[in-house]
Image (spheres, rainbow, N blue to C red):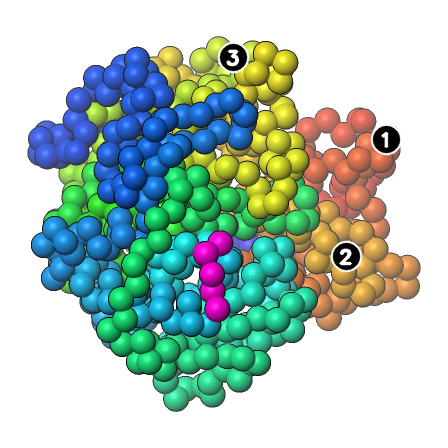
Amino acid sequence: MAEESGDTDTDGDGELEARLADQETFDPPESFVEQANVADDGIYEEFEENWPDCWERAANLLSWDQEYETVLEDDDAPFYKWFTGGELNASANCLDRHVEDGAKNRAAIKWEGELGETRTYTYGDLLNEVEEFAAALRDLGVEEDDVVTLYMPMIPELPIAMLACARIGAPHSVVFAGFSADALATRMNAADSEYLVTCDGYYRRGDALNHKEKADKGLRGVDHEVTSVVVDRLGDELNHFLGNSAHDYDELIEEHAGASVEPVSRDAEDMLFLMYTSGTTGQPKGVKHTTGGYLSYAAWTSHAVLDVKPEDTYWCAADIGWITGHSYIVYGPLALGTTSMMYEGTPDYPERDRLWELVEKNGVDIFYTAPTAIRAFMKWGSQYPEEHDLSSLRLLGTVGEPINPRAWKWYYTHIGGENCPIVDTWWQTETGGMMITTLPGVGTMKPGSAGPPLPGIDARIVDTSGEQIEAGDAGYLTVQNPWPGMLRTLYQNDERFLAEYWQEYSDEESDEWVYFPEDGAKIDDDGYITILGRVDDVINVSGHRLGTMEIESAIVGVEGVAEAAVVGGSHEVKGQAVYTYVILEEGQGDSESMRERIVEGVEDAIGPIARPEEVVFTPELPKTRSGKIMRRLLEDLASGEELGNTSTLRNPEIVDEIAARISDSD
Ligand code: WTA
């Protein structure tokens, strides 16, 4: 609503648009199928018949120090265990074995800074620096199983620190650099994390952002001693971090130059990392991923779905601060020994063709991004990709939110040149890797539908009582058998793990466990699943998952606010935007400064990604007779949609008033 929508029709190629608009299915080009890592549709049956042993295919992509004894242990379901008895190290799998196999000089990470500077780390370079930093972490006191928090933007030191942690068996907890100081403190406290690696700053649209100030402020909110390391990204641009017991990254690397650190053999079920994500309550959930299952699954899906090959230049344009970056910038691609690209900045700096320039310059083979980005590219116009030779691309992917068919077709035509399959991959922080998507060398694509569940994944759509529903009807997505990449539990909170994911549809007495991802979905006659979005209090803004409860608690923390309700309203580019309805305390005027304080309150508690699109002051919220806020109605109001039945409201008259206030502010 707030976004102007003038120039959305972009290519001016009416004929092409018209032809594509009618086309409902697309097949991968023969040239792709011929070279695909997986091209035989027998794989679905093979996995079904051999389940769970089929998952050995994933485990076999890795090198194990000690072979596992059992593929799946389900005695204590839903606390499943995968590849038990096996031992391995994630950094050895991502680095050492490739160096030993002769890939020492192959680029592992190709990084481009926003200002245009580049750095290439070969597998040899990366291994050296990871060992040096691992040695440094150990000297600072980090021991196996200590949680190390990494609060860094898209700079090479982030994956280096992740792999250094993995090498010494210290789980990392990456906190997205865009999150606020408070969000950092909450996560460090929740994980009892005594170590922090951060940086002085980074560039956004040409400006140096001060990150250390945020990190410093965050540390003041941590209730225990913290040892921190600071990477110098900006040189002299900002003064260096002066927080207590802070160490300089470069000095540490220098002191440990040439160090060699044996990778620690970790049990398959040992934690590789923690990742905090939003859920139904105000407290983020610490999703725990393990070494054997997660890494196998990240490698397998990178191989089967992203078709990654060692000789590729592969680019997932996500941020490592989210699960997508963990699985598909760092662990999956590096486990397969390919070249993984990293870009620090925004796609429109200095110009709106920055990404396409990078694709051309680096000869990128595979490109993976979010629908929100595609909708922005579409809005900017096809002239930007047209300025560049994108013919190196072989496969495109999307993740994070539903992609509308129009954006899908734009991506297919203007980025893929009608020659690249698109994988629309549904998955979550909790699933560790992709779950529902076509296999690009096998399946027909249907724009707007993610596709069938991957081989070995038993995803079904059910009604509220758990009964499978007919094709075409909307219902709830469930996963009815376990998979190696699944979260094991929520950090130190088994109870919440059971309550959040397993309670809804499992039958505990008959030991039947059903995972509930809290997404709505429907399935068609071919078994293709279309994701309809979250059914809990989580909203998806630009592919970023935000808890409305977290935002509400930030708003009611602002002085003068009595009550707040937050919902997602539909947004042309972001998918959803944050809409907040606020009741002020008696005598508090709804001034512009109040609005600003609310926005600031949200930014301080979470970060700019949660910034409200709209703050609507209202004397009341629409409530049912039992006093529950009618969120569905607030969503419809935010999205400018036809309103449903309001007769069950205690205060139906408030609806028109809120609607008037929204249109006033447009
Ligand atoms: C949504 C991101 C539709 C979904 C990897 C899920 C999607 C949430 C898709 C997880 C997709 C992810 N189509 N919706 N292809 N992929 N989602 O944990 O609602 O940040 O539950 O993981 O994003 O978000 P998360």
Q: Identify the residue shown where x is 41% and y is 86%.
A: 237
Amino acid type at image mark 1: Ser
Instruction: Report the magenta residues as a range.
Output: 141-145
Residue 329 in the magenta stretch? The answer is: no
Q: Which residue is mark 3?
A: 468
In the picture, measured across the screen, residue 475 lies left or right of residue 223, that is left
**Mark 1 Cα shell of 10 Å, populated few (<14), some (14-19), many (≥20):** few
Amino acid type at image mark 2: Val
In the picture, measured across the screen, residue 412 lies left or right of residue 624, that is left
Amino acid type at image mark 3: Gln
Quick one: label 3 or label 2, which is nearer the N terminus? 3
Measured Cα–Cα span from mark 3 to mark 2: 40 Å
In the picture, measured across the screen, residue 78 lies left or right of residue 404, that is right
User: What element does badge 3 sit on?
Assistant: loop
Measured Cα–Cα span from mark 3 to mark 1: 31 Å
Point out residue 493 in the picture as x, y percentages from the top left corner. 63, 42
User: What element does badge 2 sit on?
Assistant: helix
Residue nearest the observer in this picture, 168 or 431 = 168
Q: Which residue is mark 1?
A: 626
Above or below: residue 534 compared with residue 127: above
Nearer mark to the viewer, of 3 and 2: 3
Q: What mark, if any, has residue 556 been given in the picture?
A: 2
Q: Quadrant of the C terminus?
A: bottom right
Quick one: label 1 or label 2, which is nearer the N terminus? 2
Examine the rendering and report whether any part of residue 82 can be seen.
Answer: yes
Point out residue 533 in the picture as x, y percentages from the top left corner. 52, 34
**Mark 2 Cα shell of 10 Å, populated few (<14), some (14-19), many (≥20):** many
User: What element does badge 1 sit on?
Assistant: loop
Point out residue 388 in the picture as x, y percentages from the top left corner. 16, 58
Asked where in the image residue 485 lies, by quadrant, the reply is: top left
